[in-house]
Amino acid sequence: MVNLTPWEQEWVQIQEDLRQSPGVQVLQEVRGDILEEDILSNARDSGGGPHFAPSLFERSVRFSEIGSQWQTVEPYSFVVGEFFLTPLEQAVREDPPDFTSSFYSDDEQRIGQGLRVIDDTPFTGAGSFTAIRLHTGSIDPELWFSDHLRGLWRMDLDYSTYVDFLRLTKGAFGWQHLFTQAPLEEEEFRRVTDRIVNMLDALPQIFPDRDCTPLRERWEARL
């Protein structure tokens, strides 16, 4: 039996918390097998691949996939969420996402060739995803978010901080835009801001042991 790291146990607990909470309905979830160590080592040590800081791998799970789709129930503010993590070791070996759609600008399509998805929305098919950008010689990759509103947004987060906030939000839709330059004051983003407001109202009530102060402070800074 494979021993889980404390970080992996944390993600197992997140899924358990969602299932056990009376304020949440879990619609779908998945937790794949632990990747074999030789696969992980080959990905980390590949001479032709990116060489990330070892600390990044410590914040990556070894599950081949792990994710949940959920929504709140009354009387809480309505929140819909989904996370679907792919381990770094696996993500860097995947193909880039499809950027051939006219939805993306030429510059975004160019950036997209270097992106590898680390958090996705396959259950809902919402189309949003977060990806790391591979750069030769970079040990701390950029993070980019595609929201299918206006295309691609660079996030003001590194990988380790991203997964920390993902753990806190549990993938509540819209949270990523707290850390982009999206013009949240514009009407086009009204649905996003409504989702953020509902998230900040519901999650501290449903999960009082989780400190949402950093999210609230970021929201106030974005207003």
Image: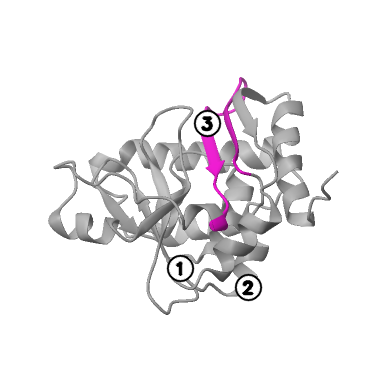
Write the start and end of the magenta stretch as one range: 64-89
Q: Is residue 68 above or below residue 91?
A: above
Label 3 secondary element: loop
Q: Is residue 18 left or right of residue 80?
A: right
Residue 155's x, y, as percent? 40, 61
The circle on residue 132 is none
* Gap in angstroms between the C-alphas marked 1 and 2: 14 Å
Q: Dividing the picture into quarters, in which one does residue 25 lie?
A: top right
Q: Earlier in the sequence, mark 1 or mark 2?
A: 1
Q: Would residue 78 be counted in the magenta stretch? A: yes
Residue 72's x, y, as percent? 59, 26
Asked whether disc 2 touches disc 3, contact meaning CB atoms under 8 Å apart, the reply is no
Task: Give the residue at mark 2.
Answer: 54
Q: Residue at x 37, y 50 (%)?
A: 95
Q: Would residue 143 be counted in the magenta stretch? A: no
Residue 69's x, y, as percent? 56, 29
Q: Amino acid at mark 2?
A: Pro
Q: Is residue 96 left or right of residue 72?
A: left
Residue 79's x, y, as percent? 52, 31
Q: Residue at x 67, y 64 (%)?
A: 58
Task: Give the residue at mark 1.
Answer: 49
Asked whether disc 1 touches disc 2, contact meaning CB atoms under 8 Å apart, the reply is no
* Gap in angstroms between the C-alphas marked 2 and 3: 35 Å
Task: Give the residue at mark 3.
Answer: 79
* Gap in angstroms between the C-alphas marked 3 and 1: 38 Å
Label 2 secondary element: helix
State which quarter of the image contains the N terminus: top right
| Residue 160 shows in this picture | no
Q: Earlier in the sequence, mark 2 or mark 3?
A: 2
1 or 2: mark nearer the eye: 1
Q: Residue at x 48, y 41 (%)?
A: 197
